[in-house]
């Protein structure tokens, strides 16, 4: 029951739902999430950490970047099912459309990318 509550709490925030939608498109580093959602580095990092802690994401190092992607081998069995629900939901929300549009132009800028905002 604790895993389900943790997963539902992680998805109870609009920013985290938007991050999940972006990561359903492609794996991203923090700077790409920042650019796609037009949010600060600290906000992106904090919410990525919450999603990772709830079992939705995995992270790997690629040079200077930490790359986040959906964790399909998660220990939280509810996370995979909830992520699938998001993937199958209709994307009619204008905010999500704008996030995906910005994601197409997002670039990996380096470890200090959040300091220039």
Image: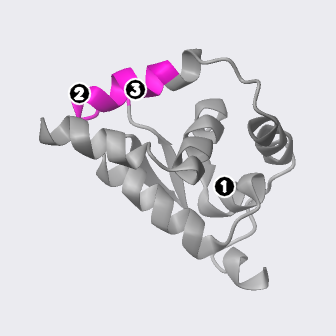
> What residue span does the magenta drawing correspond to?
72-85
The residue that mark 1 highlights is 33
- Can residue 55 be seen here? The reply is no
- Is 11 on the left or on the right of 5, as rendered? right
The residue that mark 2 highlights is 77
Residue at the image point whose x is 73% and y is 60% from the top: 108
- Is 65 on the left or on the right of 115, as rendered? left
Q: Residues within 10 Å of mark 2 (few under 14, many from 20)?
A: some
Q: Residues within 10 Å of mark 1 (few under 14, many from 20)?
A: many
Residue at the image point whose x is 47% and y is 67% from the top: 46
Q: Which mark is residue 82?
A: 3
* Percent of width and height locating residue 23: 59, 39
The residue mark sitting in front, 3 or 1, is: 3
- Is 11 on the left or on the right of 92, as rendered? left
Q: What element does badge 2 sit on?
A: helix
* Percent of width and height locating residue 51: 41, 50
Q: What is the residue that sits farthest to the bottom in this orientation? A: 115
The Cα atoms of the two marked residues, 3 and 2, are separated by 9 Å
**Between 95 and 64, which is closer to the camera in this rendering?**
95
* Percent of width and height locating residue 84: 46, 20
| Disc on the earlier residue, 3 or 1 | 1
């Amino acid at each position: 029951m604790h895993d389900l509550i943790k997963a539902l709490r992680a998805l109870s925030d609009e920013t985290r739902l938007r991050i999940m939608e972006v990561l359903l498109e492609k794996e991203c580093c923090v700077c790409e999430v920042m650019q796609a959602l037009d949010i600060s580095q600290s906000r992106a990092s904090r919410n990525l950490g919450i999603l990772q802690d709830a079992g939705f994401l995995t992270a790997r190092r690629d040079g200077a970047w930490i790359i986040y992607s959906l964790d399909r081998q998660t220990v939280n069995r509810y996370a995979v099912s909830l992520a699938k629900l998001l993937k199958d939901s209709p994307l009619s929300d204008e905010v999500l459309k704008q996030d995906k549009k910005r994601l197409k132009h997002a670039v990996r800028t380096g470890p200090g990318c959040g300091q220039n905002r």
